[in-house]
Amino acid sequence: MAKQLIFTPPSPDAPGYLRRTKKALEFRQMVSSKNAGPETIDALVDFLLPYIEEPKDREEAKESLFDATEAQFLQLIDVVSGNAEENPTQAQKMNERSNSGQQE
């Protein structure tokens, strides 16, 4: 069953704008250049996790992020960095366990 992932990026007026933007741009460059290792992916998920409103359970939210597509991750990074207007979670659902064959 698909879980609704609600992602609320910080506003450009929220404190820490340059810090967030710098980190988001670093992640974007690493992922786009295919130089991201397992530690980078874990750090990216941890970076995005505070902006996930739903699911409330942090482990469930983390699992939902791990099930995102590459395009969804890049869109989320772009939204946090201020390089995109459209939040990908507003228009679609991300599967909790998409096509993984795992059952709870």
Image (tube, helix red, strand yellow):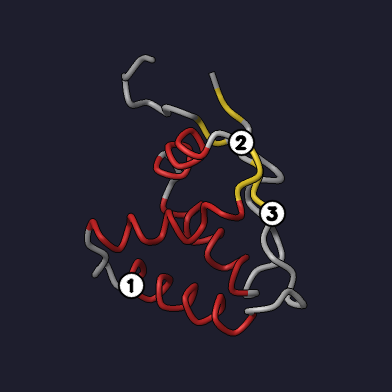
Q: Which residue is mark 3?
A: 8
Residue 99: x %, y % from top left: 37, 26
Q: What's the residue at 51%, 39% (across, down)?
A: 58
Q: CA distance from mark 2 to mark 1?
A: 28 Å
Give left or right: position of 30 versus 98: left
Q: Secondary structure at mark 2?
A: loop
Q: Which mark is residue 56?
A: 2
Marked residue nearer the N-terminal end (2 or 1): 1
Q: How dense is the environment of label 3, judged by Cα within 10 Å: few (below 14), some, or many (20 and up)? A: some
Q: Amino acid at mark 1?
A: Met
Marked residue nearer the N-terminal end (2 or 3): 3
Q: What's the residue at 49%, 72% (across, down)?
A: 24
Query: Image height check: is 1 above or below 53?
Result: above
Q: Which residue is mark 1?
A: 30
Give left or right: position of 4 versus 19: right
Q: Secondary structure at mark 3?
A: loop
Mark 2 vs mark 3: in front: 2
Which quadrant of the view contains residue 28? bottom left
Q: Amino acid at mark 2?
A: Lys
Mark 1 and mark 2 in contact (Cβ < 8 Å)?
no
Mark 3 vs mark 1: in front: 3
Residue 15: x %, y % from top left: 69, 78
Query: Image height check: is 69 above or below 64?
Result: below
